Amino acid sequence: MSQSPEPAGLGRRALSRRASARRLAAVAASCCVLAASASACASAQQPGATDAGTQIQVVAAETVWGDIAKQIGGDEVQITSILGVDGKGGVAGTAEQAAAFQPTAADSKALQAAQLVILNGAGLDPWVSQTLSSNAGINRLEVNVANQVGVTPGQNPYLWYDPAYVQTAARQIEQDFVQLRPNKQAYFQQQETEFEANAVTADEQTLSGLKQKYSGMVVATCDQVGAELAAQLGLKAVQPKSAALLAQSGGRILLCDAEDPGATSQAILKQAGVDQIPVVALSAYPEPAGTSYQEWQASQLQSVSQALAQG
């Protein structure tokens, strides 16, 4: 959850605005070719604009992005989230399991009917693009968070652990909502501003405090989730290859996704109890179901702070 320097943040925002403008121009051009009247071309400047009496139909590949989109869209949006602790088939599990997820017929139908699709990218949800490829959806907008922030497959895909990435995604989602409902621009902007103040800024302040106090401390991790959080806190993460090597790792605490079903992770978790190493049970997705992004992150950071104080 490291805070990116301001120029980088501005660069990301400018990039997202240019991407949005290119999508707008492409749709406008296609409509003008098909329509002979000047009024048809004028209306194309607001592709996919929804009726005032309807909600924008949004499908998020992961519950965390769905929650963030709901906080920004408020009553103007209808959110369908697919993968998470309350997703189809239960907990998403590891990144590999999430990538191998097979959407149900209902999931596919929702994706193809959506006016805005939000996916994480970075190899975490390739099934979204595979599903959408069968229906191009001329007026559909898509937010691929990894593409927005420059993270590629092979890198850590848990982008919602970085406040700067969340901020970039939130701003793009807000811009797309405005594109779909232009007369609600002030409302969406206010909602997004409040989200940043209540979630992103709060995370950055908490992380900064923990980093100043514990930067450089050695911690053990089981997985990518723990490694990402350790990096955001300025901690020195080591990942033992077996339970027998946990004590030798020098980790003062253990950061581990408790939902990871892998035998190695479970063995390391068990060994931490034997070695009396404080454990922070993380989760890759908001937990329990229905928990807001900021409630979930605040809870995990509080647990980390308590464990570091003990370690």
Image: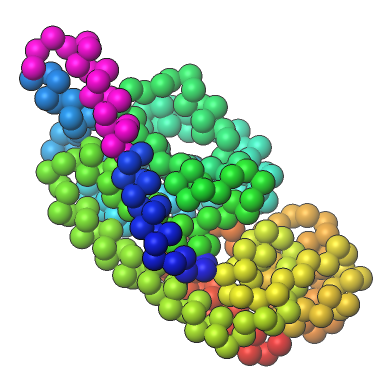
Q: Residue furthest right?
A: 244
Identify the image quadrant of the C terminus: bottom right
Q: Residue furthest front?
A: 7
On the picture, is 90 further left or further right than 188?
Answer: right
Provide the major secondary structure of the magenta segment. Answer: helix
At which x and y percent is residue 14?
34, 49
Residue name at image x 19 percent, y 16 percent: 32
On the question of residue 51 being in view, the answer is yes
Q: Is residue 164 magenta?
A: no
At which x and y percent is residue 44?
18, 25
The image quarter containing residue 170 is bottom left
Give the total of numbered labels.
0
Q: Is residue 37 magenta?
A: yes
Residue name at image x 33 percent, y 41 percent: 18
The image quarter containing residue 53 is top left
Q: Is residue 235 above or below residue 26?
A: below
On the picture, is 250 further left or further right than 256?
Answer: right
At which x and y percent is residue 182?
16, 41
**Nearest the eye: 34 or 15:** 15
The magenta segment:
20-38
At which x and y percent is residue 271?
84, 73
On the picture, is 181 further left or further right than 105?
Answer: left
On the question of residue 163 being in view, the answer is no
